[in-house]
Image: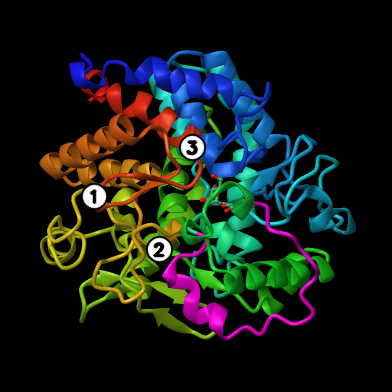
Amino acid sequence: MVESEFSDLIPRAKEILRRNDAGVFTKPGPRQYPHQWNWDSAVIALGLAHFDLPRALIEIRSLISGQWRDGMIPHVVYHLTPSDYFPNPAFWQIENSPHAPTTATSGITQPPLLASIIHTIHARTPIPDFIRKVYPALLRWHRWLHTARDVDQSGFACLIHPWESGTDDSPRWLKALAAITPTDVPPFRRGDTQHVAAAERPHHADYECFVHLIDVFRRSRYDPPALLSQSPFLVQDILFNSILYRANDDLRALAIELNEPTAEIDSWLNRMRANFNARFWDETQHLYFDYDARNQMPICVNTAMTFAPLYAGLVTSQRTAQLIDEHWLNPAEYGKGGRVHYALTTVSKSESRWEPRRYWRGPVWIVYNWLMIEGLKRYGYNDLADALRRDSLELIAHSGFREYYDPRDGSGCGSPDFSWPAALAIELLSYAQLH
Ligand code: 2M8
């Protein structure tokens, strides 16, 4: 039963997804993001599956059509729609890699949500034939993450570009980026600030680094060993690896159903589980921190990604209580209080770099709220999960389907008519029936 105050959200959400539908893929935002993004598409498929399962499966097949020969599923598939988005397909120069597909794509990846999304869709409405067809592609992608991106045999995938994290300008990456001097930056013209206020987007200096890194990668022809040894940016992201861990778990469940061997997936899971807390948990501050694999040091910045291991189920009950009591509920960090009325601010208010309207520097993102709702439920924090679900729906109801929201007054930021909140409004409003 959908709460009456949100009853118009489902038709409105479907309308957004219909308007952003480009035939075989869905644009994350109608003007600013006119191509197919990896983790956006996975979440969009979850929303679509509630009312148009065949179209959801087309979304997934289109994303997989961009898979590289070595297994990577890229962060953007272009499907050759003309646009003013920067970088355009030609900028990546992927044709110089022997691994590149014939489809136009970017040369990096994004958080591997896809296996978990397919597993969820399948659990609700069995799609065994589809699972059989896509399973090899999922396995190859995860294998690529565990080989081409594992620099120290720890089991964790390394990211070589902030865009791979999905939380592009997070303050988590600032120190690593500051150590990079962007030299000979190729000329480029940002498309994002044509559509959205510059104050809500990354700073220009960050963009210079983003572009410089792409230039380094294309000069090494996207050769995975060269990227691991040479990329000036090399991090193990707690969010990405939490998503990967859970996706491995879900991939394993699919393998069992298909009567496929699980030993390889088990070895990934075992290694990640054995090393996770030693690598990422900080016993002094009771926070999870990302790890800078290039400079071999933890990245001690307090962002909401510290809660990501809850989504993976990798946290002991004692540490969960520490995370929740000392940080989530703390009004100086993530708790409501002062000027903040909506959860979950993506960066702790205690961080000097907290910027409540700038991209991944503090605003609320519905996609992250949804991941955290899943994590909180997993640990039995149902009241907190319900409160976060309610905040998310209220933000959408009051400010529309926006890319992100100001945690102080709930006003919308970034791109309007955004697909993620549309797909997730449908998902979150189905929870009463599903759980
Ligand atoms: C944002 O990232 C792109 C680059 O990939 C951009 O800013 O141009 C991020 O929020 C990312 O997580 C998201 O997938 C993408 C499309 O919504 O936009």
Reading the image, the residue beneath label 2 is: 361
- Tell whether circle 3 marks a residue whose Cβ is less than 8 angstroms from ligand 1: no
**Prevailing SS of the magenta stretch:** loop
Reading the image, the residue beneath label 3 is: 416
Q: Which mark is residue 343?
A: 1
Q: Give the amino acid at mark 2.
A: Arg
Q: How far apart are the alpha carbons under marks 2 and 3?
A: 19 Å
**Residue 256 visible in this rendered orientation of the protein:** no
Residue 274 in picture, x, y percent from top left: 36, 66
- Looking at the rendered image, the quarter that the C terminus falls into is top left
Lower sequence index among marks 1 and 2 = 1
Q: For the residue labelled by badge 3, is the local secondary structure a helix, a strand or a loop?
A: loop
| 10 Å crowding of disc 1: few (<14), some (14-19), many (20+) | many
Q: Which mark is residue 33?
A: none
Which of these two is toward me, 230 or 32? Answer: 32
| Residue span colored magenta | 168-191
Q: For the residue labelled by badge 1, is the local secondary structure a helix, a strand or a loop?
A: loop
Whether residue 3 sits left or right of residue 240 in the image: it is left
| Magenta run includes residue 232 | no
**Residue 223 visible in this rendered orientation of the protein:** yes
- Vertical position of residue 388 compared to residue 27: above or below: below
- Looking at the rendered image, the quarter that the N terminus falls into is top left
| 10 Å crowding of disc 2: few (<14), some (14-19), many (20+) | many
Q: Give the amino acid at mark 1.
A: Ala
